[in-house]
Image: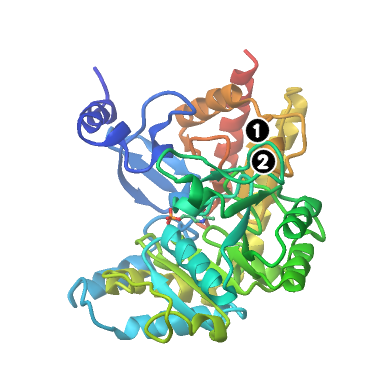
């Protein structure tokens, strides 16, 4: 008898492009057909066929405290009686803005939007208006949502002008996005020198989650800051994944380097749709209605989303001890998998920082997108499917970070390691 997930997917394929509302959910790169999730609680996802999985997707980042944490659930339950959307200001918007400003020192003013994509699109519009320049620089392999300006491939060389990564992105849009190589300051410097006084901003994931997890080499982020300052360009940290996950102040809490603008998402909605961008007041005051740069949103600052987000941020400030604990768990898993790779003589690299990590099936240390692309994605597919069989739900792509939550207890980590050993053995059969 077929599974319910299978039959739902067949129906979905008739009415939703590719059967899913976001591409990576379709399991295209790992094979098989996606599971439909019925419910989620703590460390577990439960599918419509009743099977439970340890959740290492964490909704792609927001579930820092596991699924449906009681504090967030109760806050949303209590807010339900007050209505769902007002189209007028609500006090929660002030509270969450004050909270974000108090937690991230580089943010003096913040604007709420509905997704990470909206946040990055608005941030570069603002940077362009502020600097009166058109071009932006991004790094190959960094993902900043699906705004046209960000769907640009690197081409073959760092000096190459962008070419659209998706049909529908015009070449005239693409020409304003230049791509540098992550962890390669010389590639960035070259772009600055080749485009004098034309770079509005450099945007990057300071720790990258979207080519699989890649960590900045010592001096890389400092060097970017220096180049931006020297050339009069804004530095934008896209902390949609790392914000509040790597520390209460995101990646910015781990370094003295401060960006001019920051984009946020995911965690500040506690699982409901939210994004935000913020930075120095002098720049943020250019946003309408304070200034001329237009950006708006019917559902922005939605009362339910801000309720969930506030509950999440309160949990974070009340429990700073989660960060060393998550790091301990991350290190334990990463080291356990490294040992398994070594024992089974499998080519692989594990990158880890805090509660984010990725196992790459490659011989090469992964420091940029080209390194990541040397991974054996067929092996990853075998590993992914066996992990699923063993009750562990990984992000269904080699080029994603895995996300740990505080709901994962030591017994869960043992389960993951046991599953990993079986899955790794499968990759060499
Ligand atoms: N920026 C980063 C770093 C992301 O990881 C993502 C999504 O994964 C986005 C932006 C886009 O966010 P959203 O999917 O909420 O539009």
Towards the viewer: 188 or 361: 188
Find residue 423 and report its horizontal and vertical position in percent: 58, 25
Against 1, is 16 above or below? below
- Identify the residue under disc 1: 373
**Residue pictured at 63% horizontal, 20% vertical:** 425
| Mark 1 C-beta closer than 8 Å to ligand 1 | no
Towards the viewer: 10 or 261: 261
Residue 374: image quadrant is: top right
Q: Quadrant of the N terminus?
A: top left
Against 314, is 247 above or below? above
In this picture, residue 320 sits left or right of residue 111:
right
Callout 1: SS: loop
Residue 358: image quadrant is: top right
In this picture, residue 154 sits left or right of residue 85:
right
**Residue pictured at 72% horizontal, 63% vertical:** 196
Against 85, is 49 above or below? above
- Identify the residue under disc 2: 369
In this picture, residue 119 sits left or right of residue 217:
left
Q: Which mark is residue 280?
A: none
**Pointers 2 and 1 in contact (CB under 8 A)?**
yes
Residue 295: image quadrant is: bottom left
Q: How many marks?
A: 2
Q: Residues within 10 Å of mark 2 (few under 14, many from 20)?
A: many
Towards the viewer: 134 or 25: 134
Q: Is residue 315 visible?
A: no
Callout 2: SS: helix
Find residue 243 and report its horizontal and vertical position in percent: 56, 65
């Amino acid at each position: 008898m077929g599974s319910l997930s299978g039959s739902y997917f067949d129906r979905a394929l008739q009415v939703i492009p590719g059967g899913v509302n976001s591409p990576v959910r379709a399991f295209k790169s790992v094979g098989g057909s996606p599971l439909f999730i019925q419910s989620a609680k703590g460390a577990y996802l439960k599918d419509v066929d009743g099977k439970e999985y340890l959740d290492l997707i964490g909704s792609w980042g927001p579930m820092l405290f596991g699924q449906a944490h009681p504090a967030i659930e109760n806050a949303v339950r209590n807010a339900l009686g007050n209505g769902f959307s007002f189209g007028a200001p609500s006090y929660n918007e002030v509270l969450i803005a004050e909270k974000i400003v108090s937690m991230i020192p580089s943010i003096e003013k913040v604007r709420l939007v509905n997704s990470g994509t909206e946040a990055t699109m608005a941030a570069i519009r603002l940077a362009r208006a502020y600097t009166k320049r058109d071009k932006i620089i991004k790094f190959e392999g960094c993902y900043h949502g699906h705004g046209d300006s960000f769907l640009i491939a690197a081409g073959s060389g760092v000096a190459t002008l962008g070419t659209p990564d998706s049909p529908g992105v015009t070449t005239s849009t693409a020409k304003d996005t230049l791509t540098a190589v992550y962890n390669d300051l010389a590639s960035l410097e070259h772009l600055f020198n080749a485009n004098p006084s034309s770079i509005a901003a450099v945007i990057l994931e300071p720790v990258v989650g979207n080519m699989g997890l890649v960590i900045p080499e010592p001096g890389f982020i400092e060097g970017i800051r220096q180049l931006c300052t020297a050339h009069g360009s804004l530095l934008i940290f896209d902390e949609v994944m790392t914000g509040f996950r790597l520390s209460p102040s995101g990646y910015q809490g781990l370094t003295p380097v401060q960006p001019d603008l920051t984009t946020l998402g995911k965690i500040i909605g506690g699982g409901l749709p939210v994004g935000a961008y913020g930075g120095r007041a002098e720049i943020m005051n250019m946003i309408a209605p304070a200034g001329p740069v237009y950006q708006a949103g019917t559902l922005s600052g939605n009362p339910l989303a801000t309720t969930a987000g506030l509950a999440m941020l309160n949990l974070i400030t009340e429990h700073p001890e989660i960060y060393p604990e998550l790091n301990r768990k991350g290190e334990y898993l990463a080291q356990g998998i490294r040992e398994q790779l070594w024992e089974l003589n499998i080519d692989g690299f594990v990158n880890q920082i805090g509660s984010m990590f990725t196992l790459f099936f490659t011989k090469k240390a992964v420091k940029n997108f080209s390194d990541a692309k040397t991974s054996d994605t067929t092996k990853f597919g075998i590993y992914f499917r066996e992990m699923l069989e063993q009750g562990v739900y990984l992000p269904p792509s080699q080029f994603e970070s895995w996300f740990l939550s505080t709901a994962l207890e030591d017994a869960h980590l043992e389960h993951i390691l046991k599953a990993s050993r079986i899955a790794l053995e499968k990759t060499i059969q």
